[in-house]
Image (cartoon, rainbow, N blue to C red):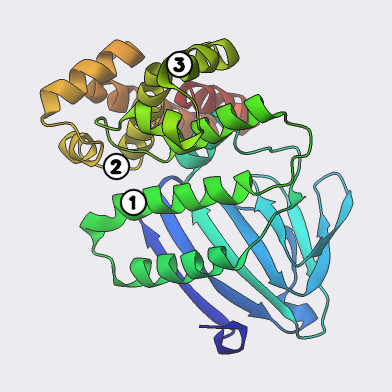
Amino acid sequence: MNFADINENDVIYRCIGNDFNQGIVSCGFMRKRSAERSQYDFKIGYYSCFVVLQGSGTFISTDGTVTPMQAGDLVQRLPERLHSTAIEPDGNWIEFYISVGYPVYSYLKTLGIINSDKEVQSTLHTNDFFFDFVSLLKALKSATDESLPSLLMKSQDLIIRLHSSIHNAHSNENDSKITKACELISVSNDIHFDIQEVAAAVNMGYENFRKFFKETTGISPKRYHTEHLMRQAKMMLLSGLPIKHVAVSLGYGDIYSFTKQFTKSEGVSPGRYIRKQNLFKIKSEQQKATHPQTSCFINALLLTDITL
C-alpha cells in the first residue's frame, strides 16, 4: 500500500467489553480533502493519537492555543479535553490514527510515556511505521473477539514506539540507555520475559545494567517489569476481560499464580479490584443523576483510583 491507495476512510472500530470509552481498539487511515473534514470543539472519552502522513493544518487547544500541524507530527486527542483540528483544504491531508480506552491512556501517562502537556509533537517518523500501520489495520479487521486483547497490546506498543520517536536532544548516553530499556520492558507482556536480553540490547553487562537501572528509576528492572504487567492486568480487567483470560495473556500458567502476584502488588485480589471499580462507577453514575454539579469531583476520585 502507498499513499495513492488510501481511501477517504479506511478504518476499523472494535471494542473489548461493552464500555466504548474503556475498551475501544480502533485505527485507520483517513484522507481529508476539504475543510468540511475539520473537527471543531471536539471531545472524546478515550485516548486517540494520529500521525500526519501528508498535508498541514492547525490544532486549537482548549485554552485557545494554536499549534501548526505538518507531516511527521504526532497529534494527541486527550480524553475529555475539548479541542479542534483545522485541515488545510488543499486535498493533501492523510493521517493514521490509533484509539485505545482510558485505562491504556492512564497507564501510559503513569509511565511518563504520554506527555499530556503537548498535544502536537514532532517525531522521527520513518517509513517503517507505515508498514506497522497497515499491519495493525489488517489484523484488527480480521480479528476475532478473543484475539482483541493481544491486538490491544500491539496497539499500545505502537503508541509507545511513536512517542519514543519524538525528538529529544537533551538526554545523555546513559539516560538514553535506561530510557531504551524501559521501552523494551514496557512492550513485553509475558511474565517469563528475560531481563538480561534488555541489558544486552543496550550494550551493558547485566550486573552493571541492574545497578544503573535502579539508581535511575528507583526500582529494579524485575520490579519495573512486574509493575508493568500489573498495570496491564488492571487495564484488561477494567476492559471487562475474565481473570483467567488476563492471566493467560500475561503468561501465567494458572489463575492462582496470577492472583497471588496481583494481590501482592496491588493489595487486593483481582476479583475485589473489579468489584471496587464497579462500585465506584455505580456511585459516580448515581452522583451524576442526583448531583450533577459534583460529578466532576467523583470522576476525579474514580480516575485517581484506577491509576493507583
Q: Dot 2, crowdedness within 10 Å: few (<14), some or many (≥20)? A: some
Q: Dot 1, crowdedness within 10 Å: few (<14), some or many (≥20)? A: few
For the residues bearing labels 1 and 2, Cβ distance under 8 angstroms: yes
Return the residue at label 3: 210
Return the residue at label 2: 240
Q: Is residue 294 positioned above or below 220 on the image?
A: below
Which secondary structure, mark 1? Answer: loop
Q: Please name the residue shown 28% across and 11% down the image.
A: 264
Which secondary structure, mark 2? Answer: loop
Q: Please name the residue shown 20% across and 25% down the image.
A: 258
Q: Amino acid at mark 2?
A: Gly
Which secondary structure, mark 3? Answer: helix
Asked if one can make out residue 16 in the rendered structure from this viewpoint, the answer is no
Q: Is residue 19 positioned above or below 207 on the image?
A: below
Of badges 1 and 3, the one in the foreground is 3
The mark that comes first in sequence, 3 or 2, is 3
**Residue 43, x across and y down, in percent:** 66, 53
Give how far apart the Cα atoms at labels 1 and 2 are: 8 Å
Give how far apart the Cα atoms at labels 1 and 3 are: 42 Å
Q: Amino acid at mark 1?
A: Asn
Q: Dot 3, crowdedness within 10 Å: few (<14), some or many (≥20)? A: some
Q: Is residue 281 positioned above or below 94 on the image?
A: above
The mark that comes first in sequence, 1 or 3, is 1
Return the residue at label 1: 18
Of 40 and 108, nearer the camera is 108
